Amino acid sequence: MNTRFKLNIQLLDDYIKQSDLSKLEDKVRAIHQSLWNKTCKGHDFLGWLSLPFDAAEQLNRVKDLAAEIRDHSDGMVSIGIGGSYLGARAAIEFLAEPFAAKNVLFLGHHISGDYTDSLFSYIQDKDVYVNVISKSGGTTEPAVAFRLLRRVLSESCSEEELKRRIIATTDANKGILHDIAKAKGYRRFVIPDDVGGRFSVLTPVGLLPIAAAGFDIEQLLKGAQDMATLCKENDNVLENPALTYAAARYLLYEKGKKVEALSAFEPYFQYIGEWWKQLFGESEGKENKGIYPTSANLTTDLHSLGQYFQQGERVLFETFLTLDKTTSDTKIPEIEGDPDQLNFVAGQDLHAVNQKAYLGTKYAHYEGDLPNMTLSVPERNEYVLGQLFYFFEFAVAVSGLLLDVNPFNQPGVEAYKKNMFALLGKPGFEDRKQELDDKIKGES
Ligand code: PA5
């Protein structure tokens, strides 16, 4: 199989030798085995490993519903947060043309009143479907958004009509959203028990919004299947790119490089960066360990973060995301007299100029003691994206296990939720509320 995208770790040479990677070979092989035979830490949450193949079960229902949404409405509001939001958003932003009207809108991924009001006024003359997504069924942000949107829609829709328009994506058997959906008779998709939120993009969590936006989810799954096959069949750290990436990150971390910037040279990657930050941050950042994931959009951020990258604290390493093939052939024109002194690039197309920006940046950063590697993505399409999703999921599992943490839980996310519930007066949180009220009073 052709992996299509390439990982180049050449510029890690001053930091990691091939022999360092080879030394990790046995450890990585053991982790690889523990994933596939499901004996690793967090082994109850390994359903994502075979999702590209299993997703076929719900595929036709997803495709039919997506076609119904596209043919019979103005679009869909997708409600969810974290893993119940970022994958779909990343896919749509990667695949869509930036100035095309969007028929999938997102809500419930924060609590901004102004954004919510603005979305409601935007949809007031439109027929929209709603896809409310929550595995636990009790996450505050989407639950609040759903309550509000349901009320808005009920002003113009009968209960029967709401039943047609609302689709819930929930746990198979439990959770508040699951119970509401059953009671109201909403159409429902299931997130498998053994798939955590940030690994759920290839379940209906991601597939329905992506298909509703008009993209080919079969190709997406095909790309993921091919990457899954490669990841399963090859346990060699020097050959399997997901293993190479995980091992390289680990070795850099051991050498004090505690922050990874995913630096992309195309704006289409921006939300891949957001999805990746959640995937890596929630999977690795525990037990006082883990690489801090951050992302940058280049060349834009070379005019903001660029100074830090070049000369700030040397705790960073960088993974560049580049796009090999674009459709644009826009060339910079020559102007007589060269008033803006740009004739030296005249005749070159923007992609070629962007490539030079990448090459210039990677060597500047390398020479500034910022180790970097590059994932070159051949083109923007569903197949390649499916590979990329699976690649990162597999890599983070290996990477977390190299750090000896459970990559599939997120106990730390609960702390803010408990405080928020307490401050909002949720029953059962009275003691915590008292503690927080005292602290807050002490501030003034
Ligand atoms: O990765 C995770 O599990 C989390 O980010 C969840 O996806 C996020 O908190 C949303 O949870 P839920 O789908 O239960 O509303």
Image: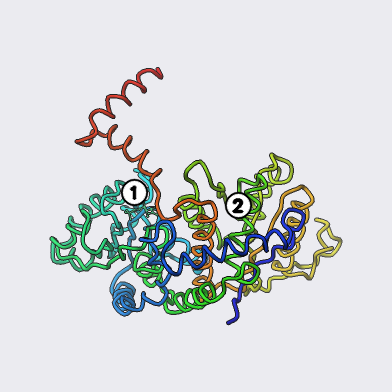
Tag 2: amino acid = Ala
* Nearer mark to the viewer, of 2 and 1: 2
Image x and y of residue 99, in percent: 51, 64
The front one of 48 and 419 is: 48
Q: Earlier in the sequence, mark 2 or mark 1?
A: 1
The image position of residue 33, as x and y in percent, is 49, 68
- Quarter holding the N terminus is bottom right
Position of residue 231 relative to residue 281, above or below, is below
Query: Disc 1 marks which residue?
Result: 116
CA separation, marks 2 and 1?
27 Å
Q: 331 or 226, which lies in front?
A: 226
Question: Which quadrant of the view contains residue 169?
Answer: bottom left
Q: Who is closer to the viewer here, 8 or 359?
A: 8
Kindly indicate the quadrant of the structure image that contains residue 244: bottom right
Q: Quadrant of the C terminus?
A: top left
Label number found at residue 296:
2
Question: Is residue 249 found left or right of 207 in the rendered image?
Answer: right
Which residue is located at x 44 percent, y 53 percent? 406
Q: Is residue 364 above or below residue 201?
A: above
Residue located 13% across and 60% down the image? 183
